[in-house]
Structure formats: structure tokens, C-alpha cells
Image (spheres, rainbow, N blue to C red):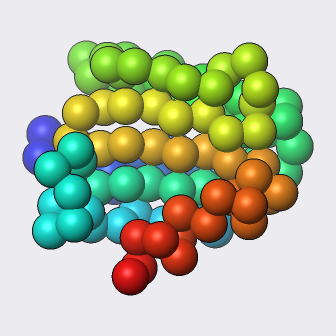
Amino acid sequence: MTPLELADRISSVLDSKKGIDIRVIKTDDKSIISDYIVIATGTSSTHVKALADEIEFKLKEIGVTVKHIEGHRSNTWILLDYGSVIVHVFSNEARKFYDLDGLLEN
């Protein structure tokens, strides 16, 4: 699976669970860490955790395992590292505070 296909699959999973403002941002020209970053917002801390859990579950079903997870205890920002694709699932407040969208567009 190519990095773009993986990012699109993640985006679809987020959409199926009603993630808000889902964005797939190409980063291979800005960073050596990943090819794509996927950002989404959950409506509550429970929704943020459910979105992250669903990504992990659905990708594991097709043989893609997460390399690292950060933030599962806070449930305001969960990061899932799939190597070429990094996923950020935020609460609305955390997304506004960290403003990754703005940082990555510049």
C-alpha cells in the first residue's frame, strides 16, 4: 500500500466514524519524517479515543500495524504513527491550540 493509499484509507475510516474537518496533507516536501499527515477532530474526548481506536482496528484488519501511539491517556490529542503517515486526532480545543493546519500550510 502506498503512503497516499494509506492516508486515504485512514481518512475514510475517520469519515465513517463522523470525524470532523478531516485533512490529508502531503508533507514529503516539508519533512523527512512522513509523506502525509492526516488531521481530524472529534466532538468529545470519548469521540477522539473512538476515532483513534477505529483507525488502529480497521488497519490491523488489513495487516497494517501502528508503529507508535501517543496521547491515549489525555484523549484530547492522539497521535498514531504509521511510518509514512502520521495521524493526529484532536479535540476541537486542542486542534485550535496547536494549529498544525496552519503550521503545515506555510
Vertical position of residue 21 compared to residue 74: above or below: below
| Viewer-nearest residue: 31 or 13 | 31
Locate residue 28, reporting x and y percent.
16, 61
For the point 75% across and 52% down, the residue is: 94
| Viewer-nearest residue: 46 or 92 | 92
Vertical position of residue 102 compared to residue 33: above or below: below
Quadrant in which the C terminus appears: bottom left
For the point 15% across and 68% down, the residue is: 29
Locate residue 23, reporting x and y percent.
49, 66
44 relative to 15 in the view: left or right: right
Q: Quadrant of residue 74?
A: top right
Locate residue 89, reporting x and y percent.
61, 45
37 relative to 73 in the view: left or right: left
User: In the current view of this chain or complex, which residue is farthest to the bottom?
Assistant: 106
For the point 29% across and 44% down, the residue is: 85
Q: Quadrant of residue 4?
A: bottom left
Residue 68: tell me if it is visible: yes
Residue 61: tell me if it is visible: no
For the point 22% across and 66% down, the residue is: 30
